Image (cartoon, helix red, strand yellow):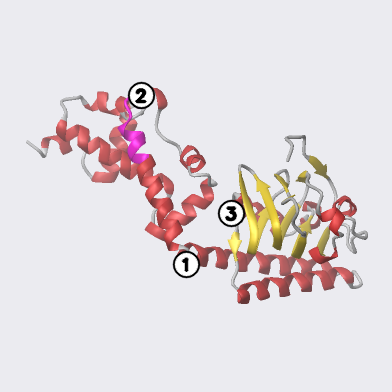
Amino acid sequence: MASTKPYRVRTITEFHRLRGLPAPDHPLVSVVNLEDIASGQAANAVRVMLDFYSISLKRCSGTRFPYGQEEYDFDEGVMFFIASGQVFGIEHEEDSAVKLSGWVLAIHPDFLWHSPLARTMKRYEFFDYAVNEALFLSEKEETTMTGILKRIREECRGNIDAFSQDIIIAQIELLLTYSQRFYHRQFLTRKKANHAILDRLETLLADYFASDNLAEKGLPTVQAIAAELNMSPNYLSSLLKVLTGQSTQQHIHNKLIESAKEKLSTTDLSVTEIAYALGFEHPQSFSKLFKTKTKLSPSEFRHSFN
């Protein structure tokens, strides 16, 4: 797909028009059955940026989904979440029949106005996830999610009254709560892949603290480590919490303390020199962190070897 400026879709009505669909029953929230999208429209390879939330459950053969720097195929059911302002696209393999199935829930932020969900929507971590961190669903889980999406669609198609917004928002919240449950399950069931990520993290941190230019590079940040692993910071910390009980920041600190102990016990460098060598701008910050983690000051730890 050519690197062109993404097509910005400002409204849900415009999204329907782009995909060759009738106007939405509700201008601010819509559930689209992907089987209703004309094949010609489905084949369009276009980079898109939405001004609204999109929650998708898709089964698409012969299809790639570029999102950030990753991509996903749809040989299995996959659910993914896109926040306003994120760029994505759909590419179809040459000489392959385009078959779309699944659902897309589009929610304009204005629909959530004056509701608690307006404040909490972006707190759901999966709206930050890269596409390779999308949610795999079992057949039973997919049935659950599809049922909620269908209920939202039915409510949108009914006569709008004073209760409609509250009912739809309640269903959206239910969908998001189930998504949290299923993501947590995914952390536990995909142990082989997740432990490979943990191994990569340990190697990355070991290499980082073994380098000779930490004084120039500074301490590693959660954001930089997550970027190296092609993950969002929130996703990586959530994964590590499930696997190890510790966040990414705690893993960084643990590796840092290991390196500090080695230098304190095997070199004659001063505490100040070690602090700078590990990337600290202020030696006092190093001493404070070391004592918090070990219950000893750096000097006390060093003297314990004498």
Q: Residue under label 1, please give it.
A: 189
Q: Residue at x 78, y 44 (%)?
A: 46
* Drawn side of residue 179 relative to residue 92, left or right: left
The kind of residue on which mark 1 rests is: Thr
Residue 207 drawn at (x, y percent): 34, 36
Give SS at disc 2: helix
Check disc 3 and give the amino acid type: Glu
Distance from disc 3 to disc 1, alpha carbons, whole Å, reads: 19 Å
Query: Which numbered disc, 3 or 1, marks the residue closer to the eye?
Result: 1
Q: Amino acid at mark 2?
A: Ala
Q: Is residue 77 magenta?
A: no
Q: Residue at x 20, y 24 (%)?
A: 270
Main secondary structure of the magenta stretch: helix
* Count of numbered tags: 3
Which of the two labelled residues, at mark 2 and mark 1, occupies the earlier sequence position? 1
Disc marking residue 215: 2
Q: Are marks 2 and 1 in contact (CB under 8 Å)?
A: no
Q: On the picture, is 176 further left or further right than 246?
A: right
Q: Could you tell which of marks 3 and 1 lies nearer the N-terminus?
A: 3
Determine crowd level at label 2: few under 14, some 14-19, many 20+ residues with C-alpha closer than 10 A.
some
Quadrant in the rendering for residue 1? top right
Tell me where the magenta segment starts and ends, as one range. Answer: 205-214
Disc on the earlier residue, 2 or 3: 3
- Per the image, label 3 sits on a secondary structure element best described as helix
